[in-house]
């Protein structure tokens, strides 16, 4: 759980050339899903490379509270002994998902079609985030939700005793909403259909298939139509979690803006629903190459090589790419500050309901470091100052948001003056080894 402790201020100083191999931790989205689907299978699911960040550890605790046995063997190796679809027990206590939107929304979906009542809470950031986007479709299955005003946590979900399957068109581009509906559909008899107009990360679909569920995806005029047959017996799996492209973004972007850098980030999942940042950086003129491209565990994987790129240009990021890089806009805006010309990012309203309002949080911090930003409700634009042109010297609020804290730490590596954040604590939610990993490459952080 983040956000409960004393703030940890961090300062990032101009770095020497970054060099070396950056082995980033396992994918956060796949890690949550491995634990949840493992808990719904019958028998032992073995997971290696699990992300041991606070968000995922909170999901592991939750799965235990529902009756699954979760064992940490050390070194990223875990086992989950599942209770089967429909086998969730009612937890004795409140489920605290800490800082994690993915954790709480997926778990709400998973329990919503079982006859149990569960109260969910989170930290100060999560308790501000909208939950109606998930509880609205869960109500169609027969579940009831009572929370704070505005559909906020803490919130109790009374699961449906007699669930019915659902056909649901997801109104916002959100893999969390899509996944919550699919996970609820697992314990509803018959076919649950989810339709998304814009493709979002498809790990839930891929993994459900891997666990033996009957699931199909069709591209139609209406969008992607995903059909799941309820009440399967999920078969336990052996899962090797690929390294997280959203974490890889930080050493990659740091190398692109820090003079003289050459960094290799091996084994990164390049599922097309996740790789939008890397496409965008290449369009900007980044020296970013994919080496040793291969397929691992059904996902495309490559080693990313990022070298200092002093001639990057600002671009218009296509709005239809937003879902495939939604968590990467904060660090992209840092790279954009070191490019020449403006980078326009549109179709990104979802950034306003993440761990923080990420447009607002980044705009404030960028301006505090001498970078001009224009913004509207669902777009923002960053005026690049060129490779050596960012003054830095600002102190930024991280608003309990790991990606904001890490983005400004990256900015400090190449700005003229050190960049500070008021609290680096939230970094542990998704990238607990961020500081030692970046320091080993050549970053210079101090703690005020
Ligand atoms: O399904 C997932 O694992 C995630 C989906 C995205 O959220 P939304 O579904 O709210 O877009 C993303 O921001 C989050 O970090 C992880
Ligand atoms: C948005 C994020 O996570 P979540 O929604 O799971 O809190 C993120 O990791 O950037």
Image (tube, rainbow, N blue to C red):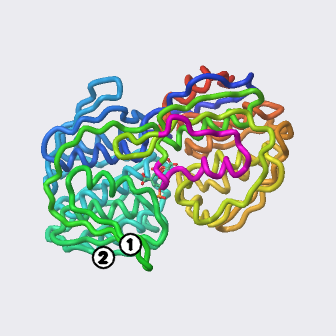
For residue 48, say whether it is visible: yes
Whether residue 368 sits left or right of residue 215 in the image: it is right
Quadrant position of residue 305: top right
Whether residue 129 sits left or right of residue 93 in the image: it is right
Depth check, front residue: 422 or 405: 405
For residue 4, say whether it is visible: no
Above-or-below relation of 262 to 426? above
Mark 1 secondary-structure assignment: strand
Q: Which residue corresponds to the image point at 85% horizontal and 36% vertical from the top-left?
A: 388
- The numbered dot on residue 86 is none
The location of residue 35, given as percent across then percent down, is 29, 43
Q: Which residue corresponds to the image point at 51% horizontal and 31% vertical from the top-left?
A: 266
Q: Which residue corresponds to the image point at 17% horizontal and 38% vertical from the top-left?
A: 44
The location of residue 255, given as percent across then percent down, is 68, 33
The answer to whether mark 1 and mark 2 are in CB contact below 8 A is yes
Mark 2 secondary-structure assignment: strand
Split into 4 quadrants, where in the image is the N terminus?
top left
Please name the residue that numbered disc 2 is placed on.
167
Above-or-below relation of 377 to 422? below
Please name the residue that numbered disc 1 is placed on.
195
Q: Which residue corresponds to the image point at 26% horizontal and 63% vertical from the top-left?
A: 215
Q: Earlier in the sequence, mark 1 or mark 2?
A: 2
Mark 1 vs mark 2, CA separation in Å = 8 Å
- Tell me, yes or no, whether the highlighted magenta stretch contains residue 288: yes
Whether residue 93 sits left or right of residue 309 in the image: it is left
The location of residue 73, given as percent across then percent down, is 26, 25
Depth check, front residue: 283 or 198: 283
């Amino acid at each position: 759980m983040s956000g409960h402790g004393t703030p940890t201020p961090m300062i990032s100083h101009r770095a020497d050339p970054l060099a070396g191999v950056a082995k980033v931790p396992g994918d956060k989205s796949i890690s949550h899903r491995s634990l949840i689907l493992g808990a719904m299978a019958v028998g032992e699911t073995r997971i290696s490379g699990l992300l041991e960040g606070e968000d995922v550890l909170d999901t592991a605790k939750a799965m235990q509270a529902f009756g699954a046995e979760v064992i940490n063997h050390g070194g990223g190796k875990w086992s989950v002994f599942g209770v089967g679809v429909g086998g969730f027990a009612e937890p004795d206590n409140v489920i605290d998902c800490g800082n994690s939107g993915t954790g709480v929304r997926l778990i709400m979906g998973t329990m919503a079609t079982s006859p149990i009542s569960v109260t969910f809470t989170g930290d100060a950031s999560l308790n501000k985030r909208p939950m109606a986007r998930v509880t609205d479709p869960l109500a169609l299955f027969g579940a009831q939700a009572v929370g704070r005003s505005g559909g906020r946590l803490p919130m109790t979900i009374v699961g449906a005793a007699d669930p019915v399957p659902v056909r649901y068109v997801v109104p916002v581009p959100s893999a969390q909403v899509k996944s919550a509906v699919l996970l609820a559909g697992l314990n509803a008899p018959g076919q649950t259909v989810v339709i998304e107009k814009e493709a979002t990360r498809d790990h839930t679909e891929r993994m459900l298939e891997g666990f033996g569920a009957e699931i199909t995806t069709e591209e139609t005029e209406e969008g992607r139509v995903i059909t799941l047959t309820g009440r399967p017996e999920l078969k336990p799996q052996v899962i090797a979690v690929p390294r997280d492209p959203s974490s890889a973004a930080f050493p990659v972007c740091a190398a692109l803006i820090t003079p003289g850098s050459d960094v290799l980030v091996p084994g990164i999942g390049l599922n097309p629903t996740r790789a939008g940042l890397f496409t965008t950086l290449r369009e900007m003129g980044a020296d970013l190459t994919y080496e040793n491209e291969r397929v691992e565990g059904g996902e495309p994987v490559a080693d990313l090589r990022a070298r200092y790129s002093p001639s990057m240009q600002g671009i218009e990021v296509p709005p239809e790419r937003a879902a495939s890089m939604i968590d990467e806009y904060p660090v992209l805006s840092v790279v954009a500050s070191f490019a020449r010309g403006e980078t326009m990012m549109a179709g990104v309203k979802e950034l306003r309901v993440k761990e923080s309002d990420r447009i607002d949080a980044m705009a404030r911090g960028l301006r505090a470091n001498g970078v001009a930003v224009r913004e509207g409700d669902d777009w923002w634009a960053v005026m690049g100052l060129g490779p050596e042109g960012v003054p830095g010297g600002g102190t930024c609020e991280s608003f309990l948001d790991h990606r904001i804290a890490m983005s400004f730490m990256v900015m400090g590596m190449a700005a003229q003056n050190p960049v500070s954040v008021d609290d680096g604590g939230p970094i542990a939610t998704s990238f607990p080894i961020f500081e030692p990993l970046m320091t080993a490459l050549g970053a210079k952080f101090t703690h005020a």
